[in-house]
Image (cartoon, rainbow, N blue to C red):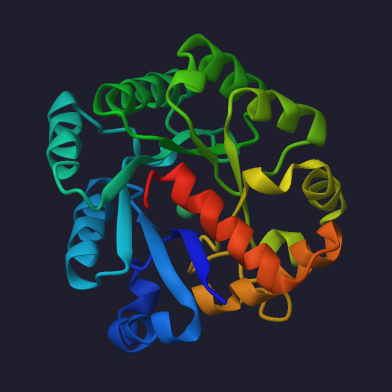
Amino acid sequence: MRIFETHAHYDDEAFDSDRNELLRNFPEQGICRVVNIGSNMESSRNTVRLTEEYDFFYGAVGVHPSDTGNLSEADIGELCQMTKSDKIVAIGEIGLDYHYDEPERTVQQRWFIRQAELARELNLPIVVHSRDAAEDTLRIMKEFHAEEIGGVIHCYSYSKELAKEFLDMGFYFGIGGVLTFQNARKLVETVEYLPLDRIVLETDSPYLAPVPYRGKRNTSLYLLYVLRKIAELKGISEEEAAEITYENACRLYCLT
Ligand code: NI
């Protein structure tokens, strides 16, 4: 069985004590490809470094909405430089986060659009973070014609009605540990509804560990629990679910 981890933050300090011990064994444990996701300038630089260190690692570079407060055009230029590496396969994570509502919404929106335009110029897909901001995310993505850029809605948390809108734009859906939570009814309904060829596996490590590790440090090894739940909901084997989501992730990130 081979598993494609589409969204993790292994540059996070939560992995400082055992990063290499943990990561070097991933391929033999079935985690065959990992995309590490940048969330600010520093983690984007560290993402590039991780892709140089591990041959099964790829990366996305970008700045999370909550970190856009001090972003500048010079930073956009540096992100652009980082994509010169052919192991950088996407721009992200970018988007809107009205949960913490900081910096102010117009600032978040401006840099979401700016980074999406960078992705368009570079012909790279986008990794979208959207929390408590469904309407604006959809409106803005329609305005910048996200269907021409493509990408994934990471940690999808909205309704299945809204999922249809993102499906129509050709987007993939990142599904992770939340699916195993006791109160995941809405997400379960969405996963039942989503076509199998649009689902990709993600952890958001070190966050959002699945049951029975909820609250602990997450790693890609726990994707098995998410896989099991998807297989159950879709009425297929775990092996099939792994293979289909692996191929979906390759299409999403344009990897052969
Ligand atoms: Ni993330």
Task: Say if 153 sits above or below 250 in the image.
Answer: above
Left or right of 243? Residue 232 is right
Q: Nearer the viewer, residue 61 or 43?
A: 61
Q: Position of residue 240 (x, y in %)?
A: 69, 66
Residue toward you, 149 or 129? 149
The image shows a total of numbered marks equal to 0
Asked whether, in this view, residue 185 is left or right of residue 238, the answer is right
Q: Kindly identify the residue that appears in the image at 18 percent across and 63 percent down.
A: 49
The reply to whether residue 26 is in sight is: no
**Quarter of the view holding residue 93:** top left
Q: Residue at horizontal 19%, vertical 71%? A: 53
The image position of residue 42, as x and y in percent, is 22, 53
> Which residue is drawn at the image coordinates 59% and 14% (left, top)?
139
The image quadrant where one finds the N terminus is bottom right
Above/below status of 138 relative to 190: above
Direction top: furthest residue:
143
The image quadrant that residue 113 belongs to is top left
Is residue 195 shown to the viewer in this render? yes
Q: Is residue 173 above or below residue 209?
A: above
Q: Residue at x 86, y 62 (%)?
A: 235
* Relative side of 231 to 198, left or right: right
The x, y position of residue 95, in whole percent, is: 47, 32
- Position of residue 215 measured from the top left corner of the image (x, y, whole percent): 64, 74
